[in-house]
Image: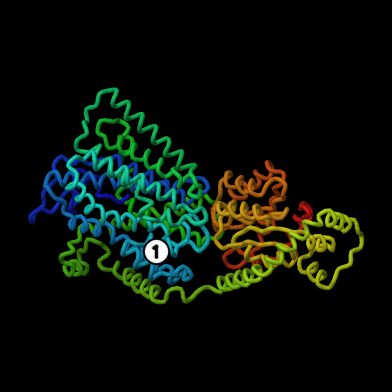
Amino acid sequence: MDSERNTSTEVSRRKKSSAQPENLVSHKGHQKRLKHSRYIGGFDGLRTLALLGVILYHLLPYDMKGGYLGVPVFFAISGYLITDLFVQEWDQNGSIKVFSFYGRRLKRLYPTLIAVLAASTAYMTVFAQDLLTHIKDIIWTNLAFVYNWWQIGHGQSYFDRYNGESPFTHLWYLSVLGQYYFVWPIVLIALLITFKNRGHIMALLNGLAIVSAILMFILYDPSNTNRVYYGSDTRMTPYLLGAALAFFWPSTHLNPHLNRNGRWLLDLLGIGSLGIIIWMALEMSGTSSFTYHGGMLLFSIFSVILIAVIAHPGTKFGNLFSNRLFAWIGKRSYGIYLYQFPVMIFYEKAVVNIAAHPVYNALAEAAIIVVISDISYRLIENPAAHFDYRHPLKFVGNLFKRHSVYGWKRLWALPVIAVIVLAGYGTVTGAKKTNTHGNALQLNIAKNDRKSSKQNSKALAAQKKARLKKKQRAAELEKIKKEKSIKLTAAEEKIKTKYNLQPSEVKIAKKMSITGIGDSVMADTSNDMQEVFPTAYISAKVGRQVYQASSLLKQMAAQGNLSDNVVINLGTNGPFTTDQLKGILKAIGDKRQVFWVNAHVPTRNWESQVNRTLQAASKKYKNLHVVDWHGLSVNQSGWFYEDHVHPNIEGNKAYTTLLTKAIVKYGSVN
């Protein structure tokens, strides 16, 4: 995506541009061209494919489970190209102009980054003030390129696709890249001075890449992937492998006249590595332990192999990645990456019924991203490349000339000023103004959490006591089912009326034990669930996803705290794989009855996929019962808060009624 402009130069591709080519380095007051530098057009195509994977992952995460792996490809390309450029500069001039490099990088990175931060903050100030939380910290950490470390301590998981997702989450990559840009020239100079044998440098870099992968392995926490996913130290592997490749496979020393066998070998390596990369991008989930226990390392290795093949001028395979479309996208890839998340978050916040037409909405979002990125390229990125930062006043004066290069004769300045003012106001005020439904929902969840915490300890004690009288309780329930006239206490009558239950259902529910594992939807309904099921143990956490549940269930089962009826409400915050579902059912065991409440999340495109996966699994596992909350609530907008996902008071009643009837009908007696 962003690199030192493909090793060296785009002069041959941009003859009409007056921007300083990237293969020019400052030397004694004048520009001196690096000799023999070459433009590798195939990297435009590789960047395009990597970028496509990232965007498809964000738009359709269920279908492109490993699309996030486009980021290691970007790292590997940057590591190779920048190291290759530095080595060329060192060999030719005996030095590396570090500050000149820093200036080019800031000139490349800052204008669009500032535009994204300002425009997004301005939009949130007007239309989505609940997203302004921590906005001051988000802005300064991004400008200082340390946002990834801030996210480790304060941000949410990259794979939490629902719970207050930030439009800036993806900018962690830019901070890591900025840190590499700052440190790498100094480290490389030290290596070139210390080691005369460059084979030793290559070996050291490969060794450090392995160390980074080992750090990822050691620090991986399945309940919280933030540390290993956002950490600069744990994400160095592809960058270092790419840098090592630059010593082994320098772009200016590759023979364009390969013999037939050599060309066939490289082409086959390219096809094979590309096939493996595509397969991993389709299948390797970011929440799988394999990803952090060697999967990311393997992907990085195959990415570097593919980079080596594309970089070689003697292969035909590399030509497949070079064409006008890829070149057009490649020039705009930086903007496309930066604008993608804000567009998606704002679009999905404004459009309610995304789940009904996931592909149509994904295409609409993609089109908006491309259009905005193209406009940004023309009005921000390209002009910034021409801007002489030594004479800012002259630039400001040109804005008010009649024949401005920006066109529209000064009118464009009005929206820019408006964006700056709104962004400034939003930054100062932060998230002081939040919406009413958000407050009401958060208060309800907090209240339920306090009640559940008190109730859970009593519930576990009651469940353990009930297990000692399992046969007796089973006989009591059978008797209740056969009775024609059932007398209820005043409290039971109240529950019967409130939840529209039969007298027998109220009596049976009172004697049944359940364990609930869920996300914010279950946290929202937990008070109603424990009112009907007094011995229910509820573990509900805002933002919880499917992959986090199996370890919790295993722990509860080992401690003897897992009842014979397990209620699962997961799938709101993101999609999951069949293997993850299988892991949960394995942790629960086939002797227990599982009641999985399907997803009602119309504002996200994974709703239908989650529900189809559950329905298919229910046919395979006899103890899995899908509670069709989606089918019952699909046209009941009055049951939900304004987010259209979390049930309100009326929705909680309907949710609890549906769940109670299913458990009473198919549940086991502890």
Q: How many marks?
A: 1
Horizontal and vertical percent for residue 316?
A: 30, 30
In-image side of 512 versus 615 (left or right): right
Horizontal and vertical percent for residue 637?
A: 64, 64
Residue type at tag 1: Trp
In this orientation, which residue lies closer to the viewer: 328 or 241?
Answer: 241
Q: In the displayed image of the protein, which residue is found farthest to the right?
A: 484
In this orientation, which residue lies closer to the viewer: 292 or 526?
Answer: 292
Task: Provide the residue designation for mark 1.
Answer: 150
In-image side of 18 versus 245 (left or right): left
Q: In the displayed image of the protein, which residue is found farthest to the top?
A: 260
Q: How many other residues sit within 10 Å of disc 1, few (<14), some (14-19) or many (≥20)? A: some
Q: Is residue 549 visible?
A: yes
- What residue is drawn where x is 71% and y is 67%? 458
Horizontal and vertical percent for residue 407?
A: 25, 62
Horizontal and vertical percent for residue 628?
A: 69, 54
- What residue is drawn where x is 56% and y is 49%? 576
- What residue is drawn where x is 54% and y is 60%? 543
Q: Is residue 587 above or below residue 444?
A: above
Q: Is residue 346 visible?
A: no
* Residue 247 in which image quadrant: top left
Q: Is residue 453 above or below residue 9?
A: below
In this orientation, which residue lies closer to the viewer: 639 or 198?
Answer: 198
